[in-house]
Amino acid sequence: MKTYLDCIPCFFKQGLASARILGTDEKVQKHIVDNIAKVIPSFPLLSTPPEMGKIIYDIIKDALQKDDPFRELKQKSNSLVLEIYGDMKKEIQNSSDRLLTSLNFSIAGNIIDYGANHSLKLEKEIESITRKSKKVSRNSINFQYAKFKKKLEKAGLILFIGDNAGEIALDKLFVEEIKRMYPGKRMVYAVREKPVINDATLEDARFVGLDKTVEVISSGSIIPGTSLKRCNKEFISLFKDADIIISKGQGNFETLSDEPEPIFFLLTVKCGVVAKMLNAETGDIVLKENKNGSRTL
Amino acid sequence: MKTYLDCIPCFFKQGLASARILGTDEKVQKHIVDNIAKVIPSFPLLSTPPEMGKIIYDIIKDALQKDDPFRELKQKSNSLVLEIYGDMKKEIQNSSDRLLTSLNFSIAGNIIDYGANHSLKLEKEIESITRKSKKVSRNSINFQYAKFKKKLEKAGLILFIGDNAGEIALDKLFVEEIKRMYPGKRMVYAVREKPVINDATLEDARFVGLDKTVEVISSGSIIPGTSLKRCNKEFISLFKDADIIISKGQGNFETLSDEPEPIFFLLTVKCGVVAKMLNAETGDIVLKENKNGSRTL
């Protein structure tokens, strides 16, 4: 998708929210906001919003003079999720639809609140999101679970495109469940090439032990999304060959929505622009096949 | 109040919303957004938000090459309200608390939707807002009607600071009711010196016949608010002498919140920053005495 004019106020909100999460003072926050403002006139609307996400991240990096300002937050998110991982695993094992339960945890991971500062709080947050997700999965045109399952069954090659740190540990539960239900398929999980905001990298995948469960690669992307022109050859080849692509989060949706491959977008809708595109509401949980994903398996 | 960093995303939203209301195409909208971005780094946060409102308005004026781009919209708002004025008047006359009913219409005027394109729709909108207002007036710490009425009774000089076109015709009902209930007091209604966004000027006051009911003056303000340093001597003198000042709308609140005079702010809360300042929620209807307004009558 292109960048809409309505994304522009949001860029400032994002920059400001990030600066505050990182504990900066108002002077640094103003500096960050001013630098975002300076970039706006030259930012082409034909670019996707995550391209600006990367620019904002670089502005924050420069302001804080840190290579990976979100590093501690990412590690904290990963650790917190790992603390409750065992309980989640048991819940999946005890549920009537294990795949759906693990999918629900995975989508819950997509909106882990940075503010969640201990595992109990996080567990409650995940509980509340999975409740919402369960409700949606019973009755929503934007939650195409039956269709997803059917495609998954038939697929030989599954490509999973991850999103954030923390979330990646909940994706692990989903990945494990897919592997258990459909053994013998090739599944590859792709992460970002370099740190960008709180997006998961190989370091995060290794930290949560995802590399022990599934083949993990870098997509080559250094933006908080997956722009094919910025991805590496290995990823692009898998992207073209995959029978089903599971794309997590809004950043991946924003960069992949125009691709013709058979992608299922699994995300929480975080803004009005994407809500409109998906015919959904902000806050909705969506599992939806790419409208362009017409390639039959 | 000063400008908060959270106001900055909102400046872009306001500029964009105005540009759209005025029927501009995306290219002009982008031009307006870019020009707002260019101003941000040099805008001092110690200024009030309506100072930026004026800058945004000037950017829009330049982009459209029009002296008063909102002129038609303002005239339409005034005309629409005048169409239903008679019915509102009757409703006040038939109500058990005429002053409160007229106050409710006045506050309803503060959120007249630009989109309301005929009088029936407008009437329904006003109905829905007055319902909300009536509910609030029964039970809210932010709706100090009894205190307001007491101050009004004792006042010798009442200064009313208007806000938008359209709204001004509903203020007329309120002003008429104050005059009927408390005859013999001096009341002055102040409008902006020059067109700025959809704010009411002398032209609007005359169009709705407010000048036949009450003494109408220009405050001298050319921003969408009332910054005393930008006001004329006549207004400042009245402002200092008034026993009660009725300040309509958020723009007047944003510019007058730090003044020590006995101001009652009557507004619909339109953003999170002002909501926090007033200990209210966005969308709330507020009638609240200035916390600094300790001067006894």
Image: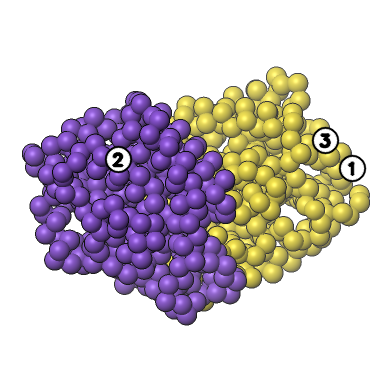
Chain colours: A purple, B yellow
Q: Where does residue B63 sit, x and y in percent of width and height?
A: 37, 64
Residue occupying image coordinates x 22% and y 34%: A149
Q: Determine whether the residue tagged by mark 2 lies in a helix, strand or loop.
A: helix
Q: Which residue is mark 3?
A: B146
Which of discs 1 and 2 lies nearer the camera? The answer is 2
Q: Determine whether the residue tagged by mark 3 lies in a helix, strand or loop.
A: helix
Q: Which residue is mark 1?
A: B154
Residue type, label 3: Ala
Q: Are marks 3 and 1 on the same chain?
A: yes
- Which of the two labelled residues, at mark 3 and mark 1, occupies the earlier sequence position? 3
Q: Quadrant of the N terminus of chain A?
A: bottom left
Q: Are marks 1 and 2 on the same chain?
A: no
Mark 1 residue crowding within 10 angstroms, few (<14) / some (14–19) / many (20+): few
Cβ atoms under marks 3 and 2 closer than 8 Å: no
Residue type, label 2: Glu
Which of discs 3 and 1 lies nearer the camera? The answer is 3
Residue occupying image coordinates x 49% and y 66%: A72
Residue type, label 1: Lys
Q: Which residue is mark 2?
A: A177
Residue occupying image coordinates x 70% and y 47%: B279
Q: Are marks 3 and 2 on the same chain?
A: no
Q: Where does residue A50 sit, x and y in percent of width and height?
A: 32, 61
Mark 3 residue crowding within 10 angstroms, few (<14) / some (14–19) / many (20+): few
Q: Which mark is residue B134?
A: none
Report in which chain the residue with disc 2 lies: A
Report in which chain the residue with disc 3 lies: B
In this picture, residue B219 sits left or right of residue A8: right
